[in-house]
Image (cartoon, coloured by chain):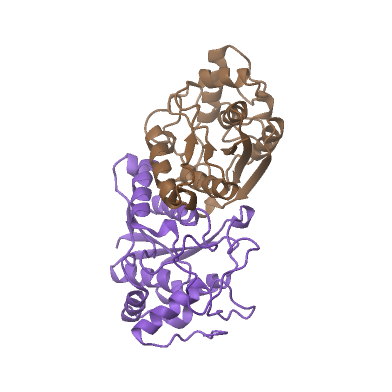
Chain colours: A purple, B brown
Amino acid sequence: MKRAVCLLSGGLDSSTCLAFARREGFECYALSFDYGQRHKFELEAAKKVAASLEAVEHKVISIDLRAFGGSALTADIEVPKSRSGDQMGEGIPVTYVPARNTIFLSLALAWAEVLGAADIFIGVNAIDYSGYPDCRGEYIEAFTKMADLATKSGVEGATKLKIHTPLIELSKGGITKLAQDLGVDFSLTFTCYDPDPQGRPCGLCDACQLRLKGFSEVGIVDPLPYQTR
Amino acid sequence: MKRAVCLLSGGLDSSTCLAFARREGFECYALSFDYGQRHKFELEAAKKVAASLEAVEHKVISIDLRAFGGSALTADIEVPKSRSGDQMGEGIPVTYVPARNTIFLSLALAWAEVLGAADIFIGVNAIDYSGYPDCRGEYIEAFTKMADLATKSGVEGATKLKIHTPLIELSKGGITKLAQDLGVDFSLTFTCYDPDPQGRPCGLCDACQLRLKGFSEVGIVDPLPYQTR
């Protein structure tokens, strides 16, 4: 069975991506990060999702991105809230974490090289997204080219890296439908950027708004215990 | 004054690179990593070098690359030793740490973006080096392309990233000469992969052999207290 490293935040997108990799027949090594994110609850979700989707192994790597700050997720900057989602799509939002996907993919690359895996899965999405630059296809393509020059396996020509982005062209509704088809347990996943101390999602941040849009498009109810919906 | 993030291991190359950035008139933010390296002594050196070269700030970020292993520097694999350096140049050595420069540059990129800096300095060298793939010019070029697509500043076209590699075409002797010209205090730097518990360099690993080659080419004596020379 072919090995793959699967980035897993514990949110709906990365959980669906992991389920997709499993269905494609990969032996999955799930990778999460404790990076000082405001919504650390997602790590508990990641653990449960990795177990439920039978990842061979799940590692949580600590990197203190609060040392740099610069984002509403890693510094004392307020997370924007709205009922209409109308703050989205106007430039890059304050929840953007500088170079986050590059850092995460670099660490996935390190693990992949050690495992002898040529496949990495990441649940980025370029349609219904928050405007993060590091979620676009051209970025992923540039990362792949760089990675093949960076590594032993790339240099020795053993295996060319492939970064799989199965969600990149899907709408949020499309992702929710795919998750349903793949049997993802929605109740284990966690999306909110700014949960209350009990871990209940706010229902108003960009991440919640996009998630709820997906459920609404498919016509199913999200089982999470929102504070506001 | 323009800001730059300078990767600093505490070794001779990165210390020289930092001194070079200072001479070019940059306000330098030095960045080191506690990544589970066998030769953690280098972090003490980095601290002293950053202070002596008047970096505005010096951050040490922890990332446990031992969680992945796969290198003599981050796993229980012996560091090769030789008096002649003849084990070098034959493929990629076991001291290669998977994706290390990609991880380090990604974190430098994050800090640069937060600081509003468009310049990163890294002391890679493609001449007298150990055969690491992530020290070559074509790799640095590919990283730069990727980084401009990854970041807010790249997308908004504010500033294009420049990764400076002032040592890339120099021989080890050339680097040592440059260090001398720039007034680097050799006694503060630390290079060895496998020091003894007192922090004395072994004199026999690839890193020591290359360092000693540089001093020998310039005809000066390395002040470090080697176990064997």
* Vertical side of B45 occupied by A15: above or below: below
Residue B14 x/y as whole percent: 57, 32
From the viewer's perspective, tell me whether residue A107 is left or right of residue A78. Answer: left
Left or right: A36 in relation to B54: left
Q: Would residue B201 be visible to someone looking at this image?
A: yes
Q: Quadrant of residue B20?
A: top right
* Residue at the image point whose x is 57% and y is 52% from the top: B63
Residue B213 visible? The answer is no
B7 relative to B58 in the view: left or right: left
The residue lying at 38 percent from left, 46 percent from top is A147
Q: Is residue B166 above or below residue B7?
A: above
How many tags in the picture?
Answer: 0
Q: Position of residue A20 (x, y in %)?
A: 32, 70
Q: Going by the picture, which residue comes out furthest to the top?
A: B219
Residue A108: percent from left, percent from top = 43, 55
Is the N terminus of chain B in the top left, top right, bottom left or bottom right quadrant?
top right
Please determine whether, in this image, residue B128 is positioned above or below residue B159. above
On the rendered image, what quadrant is the C terminus of chain B found in? top right
Q: Residue at x 34, y 60 (%)?
A: A3
Q: Quadrant of residue B46?
A: top right
The quadrant holding residue A24 is bottom left
- Residue B12 is situated, as x and y percent measured from the top left of the image, at 59, 28
Q: Nearer the viewer, residue A195 or B70?
A: A195
